[in-house]
């Protein structure tokens, strides 16, 4: 042990020796440069108005009467010519070296020259040396040290490798798991770690060890940093927070030195948590495909790998890191033993969005009209930061309109502001452009309403927005879906292309307004072919992979160029087929489209309820869901496609087939297989004949589909059928 300690001390001395030598060398160089500059300044000052002459020239000037005053010093004689003694500045003087001349005093008296002997002492000389040379050197050292500290942010005179991690304690973060919503799975994983830090005994007793690290992965804005601070707040331990870029400086070797210093500080403050945000800045793979080959970054990464292997987890040190680019991280960094857990912090689902909205609105005054579930449905795909921004925008909008509380309208407008930008009121559109945009947006909405597997319309507007949209149709689903069928995707493509189809049908011309629609439709069709296996031509083959999933979502083809060309042709086939279907739907409802477009052109913005009111009136659908005699309804009642969620109601030999879809509930008589009828509200049971002269029993339920038990209760109350069974 003694030998090891001695060797460690020797090694430590060797490690410090180069730094000390480097410091000393810089100080010596700075001192020499300072001395040279001071000497040069003295010589320049002296040479400007004080000229050296020989002793015989001095005697000649005295005898010729040119000298007014002489000051005799131990090592020089200062000579002031006549006419210069009265000047306060810019005097022209001379000096000479004294010689052994006993008659000098007599000569000066005879010439009438005023002279004196200057007193000299060792203290005056010392003061002169200190002021002239020592003080400038000390000032240079102080300034140099100050500049180095500023550059290295407090790392000492040569401490460029000092860690600059911010250290928080629980009372400073003030964040707990109660402040994080919408990430229940991630919180559960981290709560286990917090419990380990609080009660390590029960885990150690059974042989469990604290995970060395946890990697938080997810899109930007999902709350990765907030989760890390919540862990520190719950654990009541020091929290070291820094970004991956903090390890990178202009000096070579600084990153590795800062990693060592960080873990040294962590060991002193254990138990503690180290949080490295955007770890991909230093953890990027050393493979050349991901930009490897940077020596400084690789040295930093190697040091981080070494430190993560070397520290003792029994001290309670936990490393948390966050990234939205996990695919480029080095494999050695991701292996168990370094980052034992990968915690996905993804976009929240419906429940998560509702909980997040409640967290961000707890300090906001809300009135009774606010329905968080509706807002949650309308914000599909939004992350926590988006939702926080929406709540804040809603509060600002309420104040702007003179209200003391936020209502539902404020929140819906805030969603539009965040998603599409503010209304561009200064943009003036011509009457022709407004008409084109009106038919374009009505084309989208009408095609959606005429199909069965689409989302209900929330709002249609032709008011331009700051993000570039001249108008838009906004759809809000009745429920959140995690899977999409092939039929749903095909209908979404039809809906996207219906705007262009409306332009061609009405104006016999097309515009640039469908650029975003074409982009969306092409993306859906390509995904159907390359990723979802929904193409009969290619079958169940993955032809495209997604890279950078949480940021740009770039896709890379995993097939030959010949196959890629076939993929393009298949995508074009799907697009062309969908476009023809969109034109067919709109051509069959041209009068309705004209009426709706005129209404939108007049109002500029209409709600989904207003749209459906005109739609239902034209189709002859009454409030109770029945169809009026002689109506134009050929699509709203008769349906042949059977997709979605199915239920069967049986009553002896008679059975009706119930189908739930985003547009409502449909019923089909199983006995004769007739087409399904839309169910809206239980008010009547009618037996009518469809176009095929077949009997159809219609049951009318509310548009907002209740749960199965509610359907059964209402049906039994009406004594229509005996039993409801979910398939």
Image (cartoon, rainbow, N blue to C red):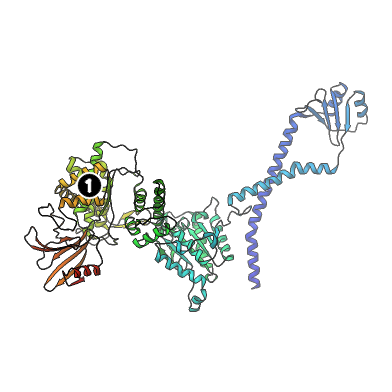
Horizontal side of residue 391 vs 666, given as left or right: right
Taking the spot 18% from the left edge, 42% from the top edge, the residue there is 506
How busy is the neighbourhood of tag 1: few (under 14 within 10 Å), some, or many (20 plus)?
many
**Foreground pick, 172 / 545:** 172
Q: Is residue 152 above or below residue 37?
A: below
* Relative vertical location of residue 230 with respect to residue 103 in this rendering, above or below: below
In this rendering, does residue 213 appear at all? Answer: yes
- Please report the residue visible at 66 percent of the width from the left and 72 percent of the height from the top: 2
Between 318 and 535, the residue placed more toward the observer is: 318
Q: Position of residue 546 (x, y in %)?
A: 33, 57
Location of mark 1 (residue):
442
Task: Please tell me whether residue 723 is drawn above or below residue 76 in the rendered image.
Answer: below
* Quadrant of image for the C terminus: bottom left
Measured as percent of width and height from the top left, residue 533 is found at 24, 60
Question: How far across and down, in percent of the image, does residue 171 sit?
Answer: 54, 61
The residue at 73%/33% (across/down) is 45
């Amino acid at each position: 042990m003694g030998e090891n300690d001695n060797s460690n001390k020797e090694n430590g001395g060797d490690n410090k020796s180069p730094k000390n030598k480097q410091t000393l060398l810089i100080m010596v160089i700075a001192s020499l440069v300072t001395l040279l500059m001071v000497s040069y300044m003295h010589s320049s000052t002296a040479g400007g108005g004080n000229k050296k002459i020989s002793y015989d020239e001095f005697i000649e000037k005295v005898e010729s009467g040119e000298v007014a005053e002489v000051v005799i010093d131990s090592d020089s004689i200062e000579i002031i010519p006549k006419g210069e003694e009265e000047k306060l500045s810019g005097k022209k003087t001379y000096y000479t070296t004294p010689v052994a001349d006993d008659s000098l005093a007599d000569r000066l008296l005879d010439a009438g020259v005023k002279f004196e002997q200057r007193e000299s002492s060792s203290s005056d000389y010392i003061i002169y040396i200190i002021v002239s040379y020592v003080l400038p050197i000390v000032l240079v050292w102080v300034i140099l040290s100050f500049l180095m500290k500023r550059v290295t942010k407090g790392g000492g005179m040569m401490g460029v490798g000092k860690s600059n991690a911010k250290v928080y304690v629980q009372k400073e973060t003030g964040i707990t798991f109660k402040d994080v919503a919408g990430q229940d799975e991630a919180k559960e994983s981290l709560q286990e770690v917090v419990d380990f830090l609080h009660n390590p005994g029960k885990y150690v007793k059974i042989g469990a060890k604290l995970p060395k690290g946890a990697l938080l992965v997810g899109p930007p804005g999902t709350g990765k940093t907030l989760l890390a601070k919540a862990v520190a707040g719950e654990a009541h331990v020091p929290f070291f927070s820094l970004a991956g870029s903090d390890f990178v400086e202009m000096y070579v070797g600084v990153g590795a030195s800062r990693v060592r210093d960080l873990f040294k500080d962590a060991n002193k403050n254990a138990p503690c948590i180290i949080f490295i945000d955007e770890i991909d800045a230093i953890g990027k793979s050393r493979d050349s495909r991901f930009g490897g080959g940077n020596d400084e970054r690789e040295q930093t990464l190697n040091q981080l790998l070494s430190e993560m292997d070397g520290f003792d987890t029994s001290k309670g040190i936990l490393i948390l890191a966050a990234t939205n680019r996990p695919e480029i991280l080095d494999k050695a960094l991701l292996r168990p033993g370094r980052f034992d857990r990968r915690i996905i912090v993804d976009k929240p689902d419906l429940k998560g969005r509702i909980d997040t909205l409640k967290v961000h609105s707890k300090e906001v005054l809300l009135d009774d009209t606010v329905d968080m579930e509706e807002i949650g449905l309308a914000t599909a795909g939004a992350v926590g930061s988006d939702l926080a921004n929406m709540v804040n925008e809603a509060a600002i909008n309420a104040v702007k309109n003179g209200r003391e509380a936020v209502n539902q309208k404020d929140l819906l407008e805030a969603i539009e502001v965040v998603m599409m930008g503010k209304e561009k009121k200064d943009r003036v559109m011509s009457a022709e452009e407004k008409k084109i945009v009106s038919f374009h947006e009505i084309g989208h909405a009408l095609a959606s309403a005429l199909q069965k597997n689409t989302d209900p319309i929330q709002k249609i507007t032709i008011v331009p927005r700051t993000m570039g949209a001249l108008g838009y149709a906004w759809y809000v689903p009745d429920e959140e879906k995690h899977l999409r069928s092939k039929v749903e995707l095909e209908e979404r493509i039809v809906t996207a292309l219906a705007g262009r189809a409306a332009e061609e049908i009405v104006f016999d011309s097309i515009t640039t307004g469908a650029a975003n629609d074409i982009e969306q439709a092409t993306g859906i069709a390509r995904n159907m072919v390359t990723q979802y296996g929904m193409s009969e031509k290619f079958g169940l083959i993955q032809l495209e992979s997604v890279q950078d999933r949480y940021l740009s979502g770039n896709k890379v083809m995993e097939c030959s160029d010949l196959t890629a060309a076939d993929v393009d042709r298949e995508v074009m086939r799907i697009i062309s087929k969908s476009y023809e279907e969109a034109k067919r739907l709109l051509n069959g409802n041209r009068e309705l489209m004209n009426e709706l477009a005129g209404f939108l052109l007049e109002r500029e913005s209409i709600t989904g309820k207003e749209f459906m009111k005109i739609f239902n009136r034209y189709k002859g659908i009454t409030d109770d869901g029945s169809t009026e005699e002689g109506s134009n309804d050929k699509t709203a009642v008769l349906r042949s496609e059977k997709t979605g969620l199915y239920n069967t109601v049986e009553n002896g030999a008679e059975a009706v087939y119930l189908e739930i879809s985003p547009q409502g509930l449909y019923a089909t008589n199983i006995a004769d297989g007739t087409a399904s009828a839309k169910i809206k509200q239980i008010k009547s049971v009618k037996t009518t004949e469809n176009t095929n002269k077949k009997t159809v029993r219609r049951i009318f339920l509310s548009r907002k589909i209740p749960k199965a038990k509610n359907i059964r209760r209402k049906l039994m109350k009406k004594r229509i059928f005996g039993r409801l069974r979910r398939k």
